[in-house]
Image (cartoon, rainbow, N blue to C red):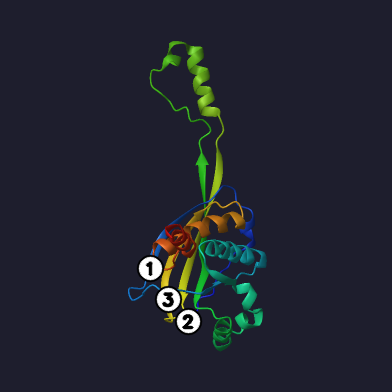
Amino acid sequence: MRYKLLLILPSLFLFFACSPTTKITGIWKSDDYKAEDFTKIAVIAISPNENAKDIVEDELIRKLTEIGYYTVSGSAILTPDMIKTKDKAALEQVLKKESIDGVLVISLLNITEESYYVQGSNDYYRPMGPHYGSFYDYYYYNYDRVYTPGYYETSRQIYLESNFYSLISDELVQTVQTETIDPVDVKDLSKSYSNVLIQQLVTGRVLKNKALIEERNKSSK
């Protein structure tokens, strides 16, 4: 089985400007997949930034725990040597030893930046407005409109891909690609991203909201 373990979250994730918005840009799901009852899911992210890696894994684990899944982080089970040597047999052995039957892997696809000009005054020219009645009013109205300085802002877009693998049927179940705009920092990114991703895994019937199902079963008794 081929495992895609390619998350790179550079240190520039630590200082972004605005609150994030995450949206799904693409989804692929196996036509052959039949709903399976996973008992233990590994959340795996690889990054040269250990802090960023831990934050992303921990937030996804928190969301999966909320819907009733037992989870473990890649940081807890994978050693640096195992990753560097690309030892597939050792990786499979660890996953079997940990009784893991589902794997969620997150990869960075791209980071882009876009600069745009913000107009200094939003009071655009209106022909024959009341300021036309006096030279002084007209002059100073247009002076303020023309000479109010504008400025440039930079927007960052983070493109991530998540792959969910079933080790029960030994297949890639679903791939989700997302775009997150202007996260404040890696914590902000992980929260926005995790909310959207876990919701998609549930609504896409890859995972179940076990906690909600259990609650409904209790209330119906």
Identify the mark nearer the N-term, 2 or 3.
2
Sooner in the amino-acid sequence: mark 2 or mark 1: 2
Mark 2, secondary structure of its residue: loop
Real-space Cα separation, disc 2 to disc 1, in angstroms = 17 Å
Q: Nearer the viewer, residue 178 or 70?
A: 70
Which residue reaches farthest front?
A: 221
Establish if 174 lies above or below 150.
below
* Circle 3/circle 1 CB separation < 8 Å: no
In which quarter of the view is residue 94 placed? bottom right
Tell me the tag on residue 144.
none
Q: Amino acid at mark 2?
A: Arg
Q: Is 23 situated above or below 9?
A: above
Q: CA distance from mark 2 to mark 3?
A: 9 Å
Whether residue 44 is visible, yes or no, is no
Q: Which residue is mark 3?
A: 172
Q: Decide: few, some or many residues near mark 3? Use Cα within 10 Å; few <14, some 14-19, many ≥20.
A: many
Alpha carbon of mark 3 to alpha carbon of mark 1: how far? 10 Å
Q: Quadrant of the C terminus?
A: bottom left
Q: Amino acid at mark 3?
A: Leu
Neighbourhood count class around disc 1 (C-alpha, 10 Å): few under 14, some 14–19, many 20 upward: few
**Residue 56 appears in the rendering:** yes
The residue that disc 1 covers is: 28
Q: Residue at x 59, y 72 (%)?
A: 72
Closer mark to the observer between disc 2 and disc 3: 3
Please give the residue where the numbered disc 2 appears in the rendered image.
2
What is the x, y in percent for residue 177?
44, 63
Category of crowding for the residue at label 2, using alpha-carbon neighbours closer than 10 angstroms: few (below 14), some (14–19), many (at least 20): few
Relative depth, front residue between 66 and 218: 218
